Image (tube, rainbow, N blue to C red):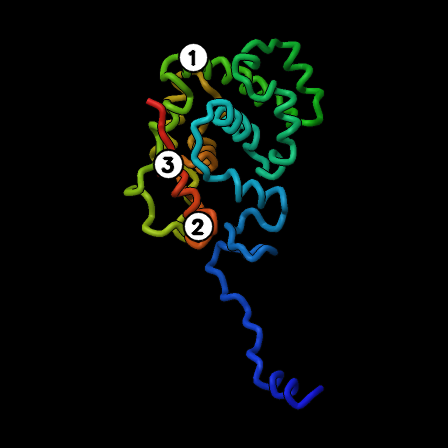
Amino acid sequence: MSDTAATDALFAAPALSPAPLPAGLNRGADGRARCFWCGDDPLYQAYHDTEWGRPTTDDRYLFEKICLEGFQSGLSWLTILRKRAGFRAAFAGFDAAAMAAFTGADVERLLQDAGIVRHRAKIVSAINNARCALKLAEEAGSIAAFLWRYEQKAGTRPPRITRESLAGITKSTESEALSKALKKRGWSFVGPTTMYAMMQAVGLVNDHYEGCHCREEALQARARLQIPG
């Protein structure tokens, strides 16, 4: 090593480690901070980064999320996520009109489909909810128009959205009201906890933690979103 190189090495600044993240955040291999629950699974990280908490008015997607949250009850969301392609194939892409025409024979067919969660009550519920969804869209103009009435307002939220501030929150006043309204219209597997999870997923509430790289993106997406009347 030359004298110059040795001197440069002597005074070179040591490599700095990234600052520790607040509780509830993990740093991925790409250096981005994310909500801890998506772990290091690539599929789960992609869902967290591109879907969860992103506001939408897409009726088909909203109906799909209600159905899948119902199937998720008692299971992990990652289990459902890994089977989502199978669910979409089995349930006609979650086209409510197509699903509403399913019969008892379809129920028996679906109970043999290893690509989905084979739970009779949940399968029957999804078909029932498709019929209810068609009526809801006729009543409100769209599923989105109805669901966005129950958006959780900023003033009802903790000042900072952190793992600690959300600890133990599994439902809200709005999710309870939405659950009640849907049940009154004949829907099933739409309890207040299930509806809160759906609201988190589709951006009716932004529960990305402070410091998560997706939080501000979701806020900006909500600011741009036009809610149907």
Q: Residues within 10 Å of mark 3 (few under 14, many from 20)?
A: few
Gap in angstroms between the C-alphas marked 3 and 2: 21 Å
Q: Secondary structure at mark 1?
A: helix
Q: Where does label 1 land, which residue? A: 135
Labels 3 and 1: the sequence-earlier one: 1
Viewer-closest of 107 and 219:
219
Gap in angstroms between the C-alphas marked 3 and 1: 28 Å
Q: Kindly indicate whether the residue at mark 1 contacts the one at mark 3 (C-beta within 8 angstroms).
A: no
Gap in angstroms between the C-alphas marked 1 and 2: 36 Å
Judged left or right of residue 98, residue 215 is left
Residue 170 on image: x %, y %: 43, 40
**Residue 193 shows in the view:** no
Residue 175 on image: x %, y %: 38, 32
| Amino acid type assigned to the residue bearing label 3 in the image | Arg
Q: Report the disc number at residue 209.
A: 2
Labels 1 and 2: the sequence-earlier one: 1
Quadrant in the picture for the N terminus: bottom right
Q: Where does label 3 land, which residue? A: 224
| Amino acid type assigned to the residue bearing label 1 in the image | Lys
| Amino acid type assigned to the residue bearing label 2 in the image | Tyr
Viewer-closest of 166 and 137:
137
Q: Residues within 10 Å of mark 1 (few under 14, many from 20)?
A: some
Labels 3 and 2: the sequence-earlier one: 2
**Residue in the picture at 50% in, 50% down:** 35
**Residue 144 shows in the view:** yes
**Residue in the picture at 46% in, 17% down:** 133
Judged left or right of residue 146, residue 187 is right
Q: Is residue 36 above or below residue 172?
A: below
**Residue in the picture at 62% in, 83% down:** 9
Residue 104 on image: x %, y %: 62, 10
